[in-house]
Protein backbone atom coordinates (compact mmCIF):
# COMPACT_ATOMS: atom_id res chain seq x y z
CA UNK A 1 0.00 0.00 0.00
CA UNK A 2 1.35 3.43 -0.98
CA UNK A 3 2.15 5.92 1.72
CA UNK A 4 -0.07 9.00 1.72
CA UNK A 5 1.08 12.62 1.72
CA UNK A 6 -0.75 15.92 2.01
CA UNK A 7 0.97 18.85 0.30
CA UNK A 8 -0.20 22.21 1.69
CA UNK A 9 0.78 25.44 -0.07
CA UNK A 10 -1.17 28.33 -1.52
CA UNK A 11 1.08 28.45 -4.62
CA UNK A 12 -0.01 25.90 -7.27
CA UNK A 13 3.42 25.40 -8.87
CA UNK A 14 5.04 24.70 -5.51
CA UNK A 15 2.36 22.11 -4.72
CA UNK A 16 2.98 20.57 -8.15
CA UNK A 17 6.76 20.44 -7.60
CA UNK A 18 6.43 18.75 -4.20
CA UNK A 19 3.73 16.40 -5.53
CA UNK A 20 6.04 15.31 -8.36
CA UNK A 21 8.89 14.53 -5.95
CA UNK A 22 6.63 12.57 -3.61
CA UNK A 23 4.83 10.63 -6.34
CA UNK A 24 8.16 9.72 -7.92
CA UNK A 25 9.10 8.28 -4.51
CA UNK A 26 6.00 6.16 -4.04
CA UNK A 27 3.56 8.49 -2.27
CA UNK A 28 -0.11 8.94 -3.06
CA UNK A 29 -0.55 12.73 -2.84
CA UNK A 30 -3.46 14.99 -1.92
CA UNK A 31 -3.17 18.78 -2.10
CA UNK A 32 -4.57 21.64 -0.03
CA UNK A 33 -4.28 25.32 -0.89
CA UNK A 34 -4.87 26.73 2.60
CA UNK A 35 -4.69 25.76 6.26
CA UNK A 36 -8.42 25.19 6.70
CA UNK A 37 -8.50 22.73 3.82
CA UNK A 38 -5.37 21.04 5.20
CA UNK A 39 -6.95 20.36 8.60
CA UNK A 40 -10.11 18.97 6.99
CA UNK A 41 -8.17 16.73 4.56
CA UNK A 42 -5.85 15.50 7.32
CA UNK A 43 -8.80 14.41 9.45
CA UNK A 44 -10.39 12.63 6.47
CA UNK A 45 -7.31 10.84 5.19
CA UNK A 46 -4.76 10.65 8.04
CA UNK A 47 -1.76 10.88 5.66
CA UNK A 48 1.67 9.58 6.65
CA UNK A 49 3.28 12.92 5.80
CA UNK A 50 2.27 16.59 5.58
CA UNK A 51 4.35 19.32 3.95
CA UNK A 52 3.06 22.64 5.30
CA UNK A 53 3.69 26.20 4.12
CA UNK A 54 3.47 28.96 6.75
CA UNK A 55 1.94 32.02 5.07
CA UNK A 56 -1.42 30.95 3.67
CA UNK A 57 -5.01 32.20 3.55
CA UNK A 58 -7.87 31.16 5.84
CA UNK A 59 -5.74 29.42 8.49
CA UNK A 60 -2.03 30.19 8.87
CA UNK A 61 0.28 27.18 8.46
CA UNK A 62 1.49 27.25 12.07
CA UNK A 63 -2.10 27.29 13.34
CA UNK A 64 -3.05 24.47 10.96
CA UNK A 65 -0.04 22.48 12.20
CA UNK A 66 -1.20 22.97 15.78
CA UNK A 67 -4.76 21.94 14.91
CA UNK A 68 -3.54 18.78 13.14
CA UNK A 69 -1.19 17.78 15.97
CA UNK A 70 -3.94 18.42 18.53
CA UNK A 71 -6.05 15.94 16.54
CA UNK A 72 -3.13 13.52 16.00
CA UNK A 73 0.01 14.05 18.11
CA UNK A 74 1.88 11.56 15.88
CA UNK A 75 1.33 13.58 12.68
CA UNK A 76 4.52 13.90 10.63
CA UNK A 77 4.53 17.53 9.53
CA UNK A 78 7.42 19.13 7.69
CA UNK A 79 7.21 22.92 7.58
CA UNK A 80 8.33 23.99 4.09
CA UNK A 81 8.64 27.77 3.94
CA UNK A 82 10.98 30.64 3.24
CA UNK A 83 10.08 31.77 6.79
CA UNK A 84 12.11 28.84 8.20
CA UNK A 85 15.19 31.02 7.70
CA UNK A 86 13.95 33.03 10.70
CA UNK A 87 14.72 31.09 13.88
CA UNK A 88 11.58 32.38 15.59
CA UNK A 89 9.45 30.52 13.05
CA UNK A 90 11.31 27.25 13.73
CA UNK A 91 10.63 27.74 17.45
CA UNK A 92 6.94 28.44 16.78
CA UNK A 93 6.76 25.47 14.41
CA UNK A 94 8.22 23.14 17.02
CA UNK A 95 5.74 24.43 19.59
CA UNK A 96 2.91 23.76 17.09
CA UNK A 97 4.10 20.18 16.66
CA UNK A 98 6.11 20.20 13.42
CA UNK A 99 8.75 17.48 13.29
CA UNK A 100 11.01 18.90 10.55
CA UNK A 101 11.75 22.12 8.67
CA UNK A 102 12.89 22.92 5.14
CA UNK A 103 13.60 26.38 3.79
CA UNK A 104 12.23 27.01 0.29
CA UNK A 105 13.58 26.45 -2.22
CA UNK A 106 14.78 22.97 -1.28
CA UNK A 107 16.05 20.05 -3.33
CA UNK A 108 14.51 16.64 -3.79
CA UNK A 109 17.41 15.20 -1.81
CA UNK A 110 16.77 17.52 1.14
CA UNK A 111 13.09 16.56 1.25
CA UNK A 112 13.84 12.85 1.00
CA UNK A 113 16.47 13.13 3.73
CA UNK A 114 13.88 14.60 6.14
CA UNK A 115 11.31 11.96 5.19
CA UNK A 116 13.85 9.23 5.88
CA UNK A 117 14.85 10.88 9.17
CA UNK A 118 11.18 10.77 10.22
CA UNK A 119 11.03 7.04 9.32
CA UNK A 120 8.17 7.48 6.89
Image (tube, rainbow, N blue to C red):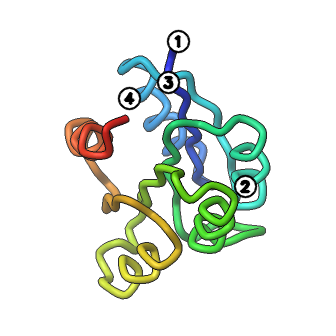
Mark 4 or mark 3: whose residue is earlier in sequence: 3
Secondary structure of residue under mark 4 = helix
- In the shown orientation, is residue 32 left or right of residue 51? right
Asked whether the residues under the numbered discs 1 and 3 touch, taking CB atoms below 8 Å apart as contact, a structural biologist would say: yes
Please name whichever residue, 20 or 73, is drawn nearer the observer in this view of the structure. 73
Q: Residue at x 60, y 43 (%)?
A: 12
Q: Which residue is mark 3?
A: 3
Label 4 – label 3 distance at C-alpha: 13 Å
Q: Residue at x 45, y 64 (%)?
A: 98
Asked whether the residues under the numbered discs 1 and 2 touch, taking CB atoms below 8 Å apart as contact, a structural biologist would say: no
Residue 70 x, y percent position in the rendering: 66, 66
Mark 1 or mark 2: whose residue is earlier in sequence: 1
Viewer-nearest of labels 4 and 1?
1
Q: Which residue is mark 2?
A: 39
Secondary structure of residue under mark 1 = loop
Q: Which residue is mark 4?
A: 21
Asked whether the residues under the numbered discs 3 and 2 touch, taking CB atoms below 8 Å apart as contact, a structural biologist would say: no
Mark 4 or mark 1: whose residue is earlier in sequence: 1
Residue 13: image tag? none
Residue 10 x, y percent position in the rendering: 63, 55
Secondary structure of residue under mark 2 = helix
In this view, the residue farthest toward the bottom is 88
| Vertical relation: 60 (above or below) 27 | below
- In the shown orientation, is residue 109 left or right of residue 6? left
Amino acid sequence: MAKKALVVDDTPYIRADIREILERNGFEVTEAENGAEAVELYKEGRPDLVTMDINMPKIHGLRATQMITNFDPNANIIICSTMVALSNYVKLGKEAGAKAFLSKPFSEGELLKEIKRLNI
